[in-house]
Image: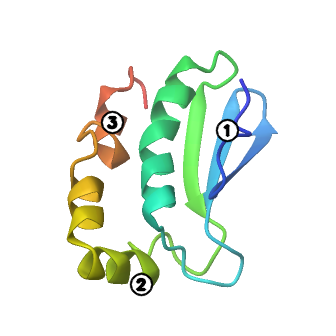
Amino acid sequence: MGYERYKTLKFARPAPGVLEILMGKEGKLATAGMDGHHELGDVWRDVDADPETRVAILRSLGKGFSGGGDFSMIEAVMRDFAAGVNYGASDPRKDGAAIPELPPPM
């Protein structure tokens, strides 16, 4: 399965059956803009459908696991009510909520 469509996430296969999902940039605290939040939701369905993946590891390339939403996303939501509504109106099964829906073991 290809993960080429993802622009904010990077992927590695350190061992057979293992997929590393990498967020952020080296040396920085990983944050996610709107695209990153949507990709974090979408990726779990792709991982579930990937016959080559038995284990998925989500980690940061930076200093910590996650700093949350980046300031540009927060400012955009504050400036544009519709952007905030559209961001909040995304499928609640996306983002991290989709993880428990994956088949065990996870």
Distance between mark 3 and mark 1 Cα atoms: 17 Å
Distance between mark 1 and mark 2 Cα atoms: 29 Å
Give the amino acid at mark 3: Ala
Q: Which disc, if any, is residue 71? A: 2
What residue sits right under mark 3 in the picture? 98
Q: Position of residue 103 (x, y in %)?
A: 39, 20
Quick check: 76 left or right of 2?
left
Residue at image location 35% in from the left, 84% down from the top: 75
Residue at image location 29% in from the left, 57% down from the top: 87
Contact, mark 3 vs mark 1 (Cβ under 8 Å): no
Residue at image location 29% in from the left, 74% down from the top: 77
Residue at image location 33% in from the left, 79% down from the top: 74
> Number of callouts in the render?
3
* Crowding at mark 1 (Cα within 10 Å: few <14, some 14-19, many 20+): many
Q: Earlier in the sequence, mark 3 or mark 2?
A: 2
2, above or below 12, in the image = above
Instruction: Point out the frontmost of discs 1 and 2.
Output: 2
Of residues 56 and 85, which is closer to you in this image? 85
Give the amino acid at mark 2: Phe
SS for callout 1: strand
SS for callout 2: helix
What residue sits right under mark 1 in the picture? 19
Q: Quadrant of the C terminus?
A: top left
Q: Position of residue 70 (x, y in %)?
A: 44, 78
SS for callout 3: helix
